[in-house]
Amino acid sequence: PRGGSWGSDGQIVFAAPFDVGLSIVPATGGAPRVLTTLDSSRHELSHRYPVFLPDGHAVLFLAHRRAVSRP
């Protein structure tokens, strides 16, 4: 429900649990590895809806953040 994208080089990037960044795994199988990590200083809660860009090397994604009140 938080998205995934299949790259032209056979890699799949996906959003797994809500409170972690994105992971990437070869389409042929294997253990996923961490692709992004949440930035607590920016109040990030999750990374979602990844999409490989046409070059196949970069991924665009949404960083879901907690609302912060300003004084």
Image (cartoon, rainbow, N blue to C red):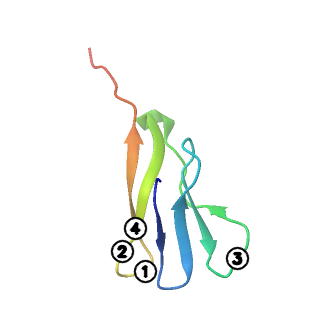
Asked if residue 18 is positioned above or below residue 7 in the image, the reply reads above
Q: Which label lies toward us, 4 or 2?
A: 4
Check disc 2 and report its element: helix, strand or loop: loop
Mark linked to residue 53? 2
Q: In the rendered structure, which amino acid carries the disc numbered 2?
A: Leu
| Amino acid on which disc 1 is placed | Gly
State the image coordinates of residue 42 (x, y, percent, origin top left): 41, 37
Identify the image quadrant of the C terminus.
top left
Disc 2/disc 1 C-alpha distance (Å): 6 Å
Residue 56, labelled with which disc?
1
Report how far apart the C-alphas of labels 4 and 3 lie in the structure. 20 Å
Q: Residues within 10 Å of mark 4 (few under 14, many from 20)?
A: many
Q: Residues within 10 Å of mark 1 (few under 14, many from 20)?
A: some
Direction from residue 55 to residue 29 in the image, left or right = right
Q: Are marks 2 and 1 in contact (CB under 8 Å)?
A: yes
Q: Of residues 56 and 17, which is closer to you in this image?
A: 17
Q: Residue furthest right?
A: 30
Q: CA distance from mark 3 to mark 2?
A: 22 Å
Question: Furthest-bottom residue in view?
Answer: 9
Please, what is the three-letter code of the amino acid marked with disc 4? Val
CA–CA distance between discs 1 and 4?
10 Å
Identify residue for label 3.
29
Looking at the image, tell me whether mark 3 or mark 2 is earlier in sequence order.
3
